[in-house]
Image (spheres, rainbow, N blue to C red):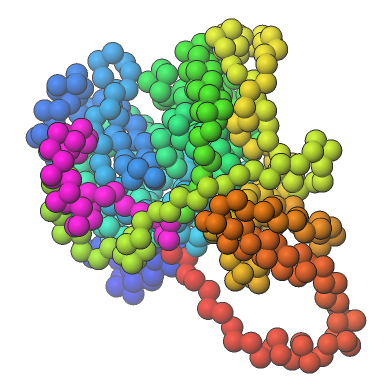
Amino acid sequence: MAVRPLAAAGLIALTLGLGACQDGLINGASTRHLTPVPAQTLSLMQTKGMSQSDPILIRAYKKESELEVWKRDGTGQYALLKTFPICRWSGQLGPKTKQGDRQAPEGFYTITPGQMNPNSSYYLSFDTGYPNAFDRANGRTGNYIMVHGTCSSAGCFAMTDASMGEIYAIAREAFAGGQRAFQFQSYPFRMTAQNMAKFRNDPNAPFWSNLKEGSDYFEALRQEPKVGLCGSKYVFGGADAAAGSCTPRVDPQVAEKRARDDQQIAELVAKGTPATRVVYQDGGQNPVFRAQNVTAFASLGSKEEELPYSAKEFGRHHLGEVSRPETLAAGPEEIAVEPKAAPASGLKGRTQLAAAPIPTKAAAAALATGAKPAATPAAAPLMLAKQGGPEAEVVKPARVTVADAEGDVSAFQKVFGGLSRKEAPAPEPATPATDAATAEPAKQVHTARARIQAHLAKPPTATGAIAEKKAPAAKVAEAKKPAVKAETAR
């Protein structure tokens, strides 16, 4: 029975209104979802002992802007089939928390045949399934977060049409072969010891450590981890993890990898690896899509051969309209951050460093068996241990300006950590600068801090009926302020 034009238009409008990536339906039926897997990829499968019908698993990395398709081979383990450069993702490193934040999600998601959209307005797509049980347990909102074609993102992972067509075809054949669902793992970056040490003071560090547990399982065993929920945290492992056990059995190989990585992280921190954050204007894309970089990549010779994809091939693509291209010009910026530590009996809301022991093989074995490991000497700090309040961090002096000191109070607290109206510590005396290059930034920090403290020392504004009697003029002025137009769900 044909759908009436008016009803169809209404359905499309509703879909567009709700979706973060606004993935509606194209006009008329399409056969693009039936495009076969490319012959070159079929040959690659054969070389790696795989078939079209074997199960798949997909992993995405924001910082590297890469999406990996893994496939189960003849050994029963997953092996990397192919890596695709991500054409566009939006937001920052970190999870999606609410609708309209332009964040691409991070976590573990399950993709079923019903989430595949053959009639996507973005060529082809599949819904990631955000929000999952973990996201809902943490109060996160949003919907229609896709992996799709068309190089435009408002919270999605955007591929080229050619890449999306190939990924879709690979998934379609896996479903046809009997796979009921495949796992989609989304990460901020590759979960290496180097990256974990580098981003140890990022506000998202505890969440990323939780994601690394699942990554470790896959890296060590090359098997899809079962994913469960314990309160508001992921748990990974076998059937006991899927059932929701908060202490699932840890395979010895997984435990050994975690211990090895933890020791490497501790050593990197002890050697002085700087803690940084990466800030984007609005997400990023793989360098192969930047026209000015095509020549540079092509001139690298043997270096290009190390890439899992051809820079020349993707550099030739006509991408059409790329979302917010002006935000890609500057590229990401790295900012050094240091933790704002407080005494053990310090005030609530401060962030403290957690001293973690250097793990050993014995500790890994104890973890695998559930036995209590022997005490080991404390090592260098690894990750932040939050004590109930917002994360605190100190940004390099050069990043703090007087303009910052006159903005939102919550921003001050995030920069300097622990300041509140109830208690504003006395200004710290400036340390004489021995290097002329650091004198001015140090002066800016102390000037900004003094302004913040002066601002926070002001008595709170009266509220309710008292405020109406004392400051009617202020109320009238507030009413005359122009309304701020809210950004759409995109």
Rendered position, 276 above or below 10: above
- For the magenta stretch, what is the residue range? 280-309
Q: Position of residue 143 (x, y in %)?
A: 47, 55
Q: In the displayed structure, does residue 392 sit left or right of residue 24? A: right
Question: Which is nearer the eye, 39 or 304?
Answer: 304
Residue at point 63%, 62% (across, down): 443
Q: In the displayed structure, does residue 370 sit left or right of residue 225? A: right
Q: In the displayed structure, does residue 387 sit left or right of residue 81? A: right
Question: Which is nearer the eye, 402 or 81?
Answer: 402
Q: Position of residue 258 (x, y in %)?
A: 52, 20
Q: In the displayed structure, does residue 363 sit left or right of residue 461? A: left
Is 286 in the magenta?
Answer: yes
Q: Position of residue 428 (x, y in %)?
A: 75, 55
Residue at point 65%, 68% (across, down): 405
Q: In the current view of this chain or complex, which residue is farthest to the left? A: 39
- Whether residue 450 is visible: yes
Q: How many marks?
A: 0
Q: Position of residue 58 (x, y in %)?
A: 34, 35
Is 476 in the magenta?
Answer: no
Quadrant (top left/top right/bottom left/bottom right) for the N terminus:
bottom left
Question: Which is nearer the eye, 364 or 425?
Answer: 425
Residue at point 69%, 88% (across, down): 479
- Whether residue 238 is visible: no
